[in-house]
Structure formats: structure tokens, C-alpha cells
Amino acid sequence: MENEHANDNGGKMAEPGITRCGFVAIIGAPNAGKSTLLNQLVGSKVAIVTHKVQTTRTRIRGIAMEGNTQIVFVDTPGIFKPKRRLDRAMVEAAWGGAGDADLIVLMVDVEREREEDLEQIMAGLSTQGRKAILVLNKIDAVSHDKLLKMAARLNESGIFDQTFMISALSGNGVGDLRRYIAERMPEGPWHYPEDQAADVPLRSLAAEVTREKLFLRLHDELPYSLTVETESWETKKDGSIRIQQVIYVERDSQKKIALGKGGQTIKTVGQLAREELQEMLETKVHLFLFVKVRENWSDDRERYREMGLDFPKD
């Protein structure tokens, strides 16, 4: 019963010459594996992935092709009970992505179900009168009996059209999910070129790559007290790219952590980010990182604009 849709022929693949295109929002509690799933669906890395919750801060669009259907997947921040202004902005961005979508995928980490957050999300969908595709992630981590019981319990809500059981990390079941979604996209022209994998400005994508390396390197020392912005982007005559980025923290003590002893942390982060950017951009990258203290940056309207978030009212 790994994928319950096996005998469902409710949707039909587009006929030759007919194109389809639609938007699909991937929502769920923090750290459910949404960004990992997005990268698998698209077939390349378009969203950063770390072990930390709330890594994704804004909506990221990844573009997948399935036959003559183009699917625009929207990876959203995790939905949870917000405590800070930044939390509220991220949750609003997630619900905004769901509200604009043709289909909604609700992803659940079967290892850590986060019942309170999940109930809040399901209640929100019910209030909006929206149906969703239920995706149970990390199926290799729990017993089959537990999966079946969880699927049955969640489907009692009546808000799910279909249930898929997948491993976003290994890709198990992801192809079936993509094909099912493709069959249900509306007819229409593609919004992007066939070979485009993401709708994210390169400056923003580069900043996200550096932020990922910082999160992975600093672990719990600076969980949410930093943000990264690309200040300048210059293509040189030899085809290489010079990128200058600023890492904003809120206190001097955090600046020392970001720099590391003798600047070793920032040097390592820069090297890892540069290597990934060179692979992504297929050219030599000169990356320069600076750390600046900007007290209460998470209450700064301009920082929200740079992250592509609306600034929540008090």
C-alpha cells in the first residue's frame, strides 16, 4: 500500500501537443523534509537543507517537468505557532503560498509528527475549504503498521484527496508523487523555459547557499540570529563572478562566533559556499564575506524585503 493511488485513473496525462502548467505548494510543520522533497522533485538543488527547523524563510519556487506538464513547486516555511515577528512573517508566507496554489501537498515527518503544529495546519486547510495530498515522509524509519495507522487517522479529517508514503532523502516514491501531481495540473502554457529549475534570483540563491553553510557549521551557536545578503554581483571579463555578501548578526558576541578563532569559521564557510556556487554557476567564483552587527535586524523592515517576506504588523 506504499502509494494508495495505484489504481486511481482520475487524471489523464496531457495529449500530444497539449501542455499543462500549475502551482503546487508544499506545506508542513518545521523540519518535515519539505526542502529535501522539493530538490528531489526538481532533480537539482534549489532549496537549502539543514538539520535545523525553520531553515526555509521564504517561498522558493522549483520547476519540474513531467512529460509535457510543467509543475511549479513552492517550498514554504514550516507552519507553527509563531512567537516572534520573523516567525509570523514566515507563517504568513507559508499560508500565502498555499492560498495561491492549484494543489497543496501536506508533508508529515512520521518520526516526529509534531501533532500540535499538524493539527493547526489541518484546521487552517479546513477553514479555507482546501483539500490536500497527504505525504508521509521517512517511511524507512518506522514500521509499516505505524504508517498505516497514521494514514488512517489523518485521513479521518476528510481533507486529503490521496496519500503517498515516501522517503524524500532517498527519492523512494517521489516519482509516483510527481506523476500523480502532473496528471492534475490544468491545461495551459508553461510559465518558464523547459530547462529552468528554479525561480529564485541568483543573488538570493547565493545568499541562501552561504546561510546553509553557516547553519551547518555553527550548529546551535547561532540558530536564528543571522541572515545573509548579497551586496554585489559582478561578472568579470574572464567569465568569473565576484560576489560580496554580508552576514548580519544582532550582537558583537555573535560576530565573534561567526568569524571564529583567527577567522577560521568564516574562512571555512566561505570555502564551502564558494565550491557549491562554482558547481551551481559552472564558472569560477570569487566570494567575499563580511560580518556586521545590526541590532534587532529581525525587526528591520528592509531585511524582510531582502528575504522576500512581508513585514508583519505588531
Image (spheres, helix red, strand yellow):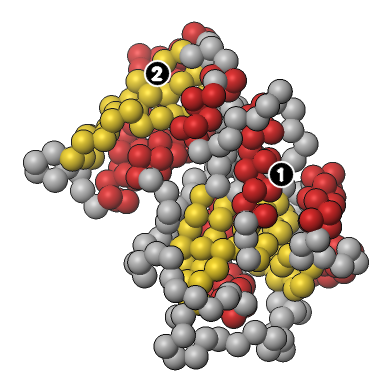
Residue 110, image x, y percentages: 75, 57
Q: Secondary structure at mark 2?
A: strand
**102 left or right of 189 in image:** right
In the displayed structure, would residue 152 be above or below residue 111?
below
| Earlier residue among tags 1 and 2 | 1
Residue 291 disc label: 2
Residue 159, image x, y percentages: 82, 65
**126 left or right of 58 in image:** right
In the displayed structure, would residue 104 be above or below residue 119?
below
Report the amino acid beneath label 1: Ile
Residue 217, image x, y percentages: 48, 31
Image quadrant containing the C terminus: top right
Image quadrant containing the N terminus: bottom right
Residue that appears at 38% across and 24% down: 246
Between disc 1 and disc 2, the foreground one is 1
Report the amino acid beneath label 2: Val
Near-viewer residue (157 or 36): 157
Residue 155 disc label: none
In whole angstroms, how far apart are the C-alphas of marks 1 and 2?
A: 30 Å
Q: Is residue 169 visible?
A: no
Q: Local crowd at mark 2 within 10 Å, few (<14), some, or many (≥20)?
A: some
Near-viewer residue (308 or 223): 308
Residue that appears at 46% across and 21% down: 248
Hey, which quadrant is residue 17 in on the image? bottom left
Residue that appears at 90% across and 66% down: 156
Q: Local crowd at mark 1 within 10 Å, few (<14), some, or many (≥20)?
A: many
Residue 79 disc label: 1
